[in-house]
Image: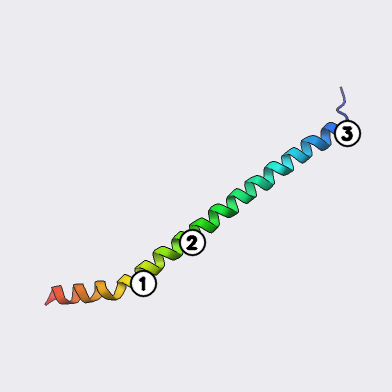
Amino acid sequence: MAMSIQVVYVLFGGLLLLLVCFLSYLLIQKARLNAFRAKVESYKDSMKESLFIYLFIQKR
């Protein structure tokens, strides 16, 4: 039983669409993760000096 060429094209198109959707999802997740990491690093940098001063004073 041979599949017609139209069925093969439809399956190929469906799989291609699925792969494009999955790639888009992964790219969005990566962008969100990068933004979150940047926010955390920014927060750490802004708190570094205050934390150092606090610890230095407590040591005296």
Specify whether 38 is left or right of 25.
left
- Left or right side of 58 for 34: right
Q: Earlier in the sequence, mark 3 or mark 2?
A: 3
* Residue position for label 3: 5
Q: Is residue 7 above or below residue 35?
A: above
Q: Nearer the viewer, residue 32 or 5?
A: 32
- The amino acid at mark 1 is Asp
**Identity of the amino acid at label 3?**
Ile
Number of dots carrying numbers:
3
Q: Which residue is mark 1?
A: 45
- Does the CB distance between marks 1 and 3 fall below 8 Å? no
Kindly identify the amino acid type of the residue bearing the numbered disc 2: Ala
Residue 20 left/right relative to 58: right
Q: CA distance from mark 2 to mark 1?
A: 15 Å
**Closer to the camera in the image, 2 or 37:** 37
In depth, the one of 31 and 12 nearer the eye is 31
Q: Quadrant of residue 60?
A: bottom left
Q: Residue at x 19, y 76 (%)?
A: 56
Mark 2 and mark 3 in contact (Cβ < 8 Å)?
Answer: no
Mark 1, Cα crowd under 10 Å, few <14 / some 14-19 / many 20+, is: few
Identify the residue at image location x=40%, y=63%: 40
Residue 14 in percent (x, y) is at 74, 38
Q: CA distance from mark 1 to mark 3?
A: 59 Å
Residue that label 2 marks:
35
